[in-house]
Amino acid sequence: MKTIMTLAALAAGLLLALNAAAQDHSQYQMPMPAAQDHSQHQMPAMQDHTQHQVKPKAVPKVKPKPKAKPAATPKTKAAVPAAPMDHAAMGHAMPAQQPAAVDHSAMGHDAAQPVPMDHAAMGHAMPRPADQPITPIPVLTDEVRAAAIPPPNDHPVHDNGVQHYVLFNRLEGFDTDDGTGMAWEGQAWVGTDLNKLWLRSEGERVGGHTEGADLEVLYGRAFARWWDVVAGVRHDFKPGASQDFVAIGVQGLAPYKFEVEATAYLGQSGQTAARLEAEYETLLTNRLILQPLVEVSFYGKNDERRGIGSGLSTAEAGLRLRYEFTRQFAPYIGVVHERAFGRTADFRRAADEGVNDTRFVAGIRIWF
């Protein structure tokens, strides 16, 4: 009992001691440091470490304990499927359909059948004959030949300038029973391709006397390709007294290149006449040319003073062979036969003149 009392006394004393130690400090409030206002001190913004998100370190593989192994392989992320990303809204729309297959055969990429290379056309063919050129020579065509010829400077095509032309188709001499003689036949024109002034003349002199001579002044108008219609006057100096005619006719190049003149005349005292002439040029070579020619004359009525009868009056046929040293100058030789018909022949017989006449001629043909 005594012991208990002792322990109780000790306990009481201990409690008193503890109460004394636990002093009330409320009266002695200690100043607490006030919270500092850091609003005036801008603090650096919080750095965005989202970009520096560090991938979670791989969980070190720990040797799983035999019982803890299922917990070491979490499947929480795989269990939540990520929402599909809308690429169309981001402009990454992908084609809905599969792209069409590329036809490489149409692009010449058919590698299955490569086109063999023509080395012969490239001049790589070996061996090459010694007489063959290295570069192939193209075939010569008419277009290439035409392009090589410069255009004429004196008469351009399709122009309308004034041109001129003088031709002595026949300028020849001959020998007959009545003496030597000469004859001429020529023409000239000046003007454009459509409108021309023509001069035509022909005549004959024998033994110093003019047997016949005329001059025509005509206006010519082209009415077709190679053809002109002519109209004007004709003046006969011989035979007999001079006489004038009004003339109209055509001239040009007929098919097969026959040069034709056909003219009708109406003269004084109601005399009418017509003259037809045709000639043709046969190229024996490029320079040797054979020229046949036929000319016939008709009259409407008799004219005894001039020795002209009605109907077919005279006909002349000639054959001349010329050699063109140049196109402008060509000497020739030939033979000419002339015959009078009808009343004209009667008048010649009455005048003691020949009805037929054949003669050899030599002359030149010039034009400029």
Image (cartoon, rainbow, N blue to C red):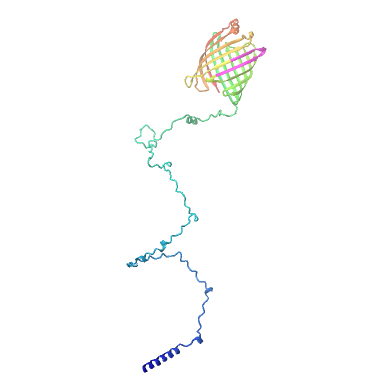
Quadrant occupied by the N terminus: bottom left
Hey, which residue is sitting farthest right in the picture? 269
Q: Eyeballing the image, is 6 above or below 263?
A: below
Which residue is outermost to the front? Answer: 1
Q: In which quarter of the image is residue 65?
A: bottom left
Position of 362 relative to 44 (above/below): above
Kindly tell me whether residue 276 is visible in this rendering.
yes
Q: In this view, does 245 lie to the left or right of 126?
A: right
Q: Give the range drawn in magenta.
A: 259-275
Residue 122, above or below 47: above
Decide: is 308 above or below 116: above
Nearer to me, 274 or 305: 274
In the rendered image, the quadrant that contains the C terminus is top right
Q: Which SS does the magenta portion mostly show?
A: strand
How many numbered callouts?
0
Magenta-colored stretch includes residue 272 = yes
| 182 left or right of 112 in image | right
Tell me where residue 265 appears, x and y as whole percent. Answer: 63, 15
Q: Any magenta on residue 195?
A: no
Image position of 140 (left or right of 299): left
Visible in this render: residue 211?
no
